[in-house]
Amino acid sequence: MEEVNFDQTNFIINAEALDALKKLPDELVQTVITSPPYYDQRDYCANQQIGNEESPEKYINRLVEVFDEVKRVLKEDGTLWLNLGDKYINGNLAGLPWKLALSLKERGWILRSDIIWYKPNAMPSSVKNRPTTDHEYIFLFAKSSKYYYDADAIREPHVTFSDNSKMKGGRNHLGKAGGTPEEGKNAGNSNLHKGRWDQAFHPKGRNKRTVWQVPLSKFRDAHFAVFPEKLVEPCILAGSPESGIVLDPFFGSGTVGLVANKKGRNFIGIEINDNYCEIASKRIFNT
């Protein structure tokens, strides 16, 4: 690994994740967004690669080592957004995402949310004895109880008074005197007087929900599915302010760095495969 000037950011380190992380300063980055190699799925043609361990247990242990170092380089108010797919082993679902999540909790991480990444264009499956899998997990971890999270940056459109409302008679109540519940949990809320439900809702939209519908993405120079930009975007916007540093220790084709640049953030990418580093560099810097 070459020496890196940490006074500047927006760079890619071609090295094994744990080795590179050990050379980063404490509390350097604001948020970490990453998708480690899945277990027993792909050969990255690199020594020390993660994902080809002898057992799922050894795989989880190696990832825990990596995220111990991630925690050290993360600011005290930083967050980790972790995506991981699961694996069937001898017909039995291994539960690897949750095994890793629970292991990280034991190491002091605070698990704040489990997010479902729903993939509407998931690959079809020929299985006949179980449902076809069309989701993965994204876990939101915090280093401490007081962490940076910009909820307003990722709010969703309100549904209650839209055509998609599932509330019985919902849209007919809007703006009508007596059309809102003046008792119960909303009792005393002046915004609800005279049926003004619209004033009781945040003007920027409702709080982000935990099911994210994002299609799988491809990049022409990579012979594998890449991290979708729309999946990374809310993590970056909620997890870091403008000019904040975003880290991905399993950089791959560089989607995290690409989106970070588009959104006015800085990035550090770590990638073990030199070919992927070249792909990411061309994609981000057009070099």
Image (spheres, rainbow, N blue to C red):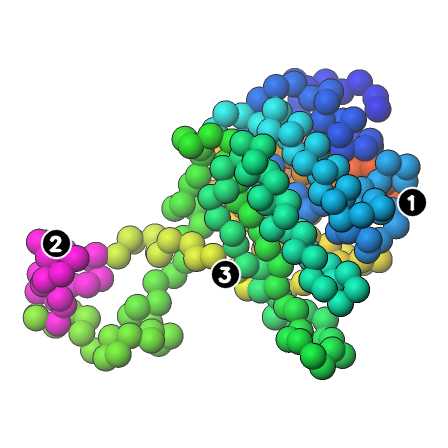
Question: Three-letter amino acid code at disc 3?
Answer: Val
Q: Is residue 177 left or right of residue 248?
A: left
Q: Residue at x 54, y 25 (%)?
A: 75
Q: Which residues are magenta?
A: 179-200
Residue at position x 58%, y 32% in the image: 107
Is 197 magenta? The answer is yes
Q: Residue tagged by mark 2?
A: 189
**253 sits left or right of 189 in the view:** right
**Closer mark to the observer between disc 1 and disc 2:** 1
The residue that label 1 is drawn on is: 45
- Which callout, 3 or 1, points at the residue further toward the start of the chain? 1
Say which mark, if any, is on residue 65.
Answer: none
The residue labelled by disc 3 is 211
Amino acid type for the residue under numbered disc 1: Cys
Provide residue 149's location: percent of width, then percent of height. Answer: 44, 39
Q: Amino acid at mark 2?
A: Asn
Task: Please tell me which residue is depicted at 39% across the width and 46% down the height of the picture.
Answer: 152
Q: Residues within 10 Å of mark 2 (few under 14, many from 20)?
A: few
Residue 133 appearing in the image: yes
To which quarter of the image does residue 287 belong? Answer: top right
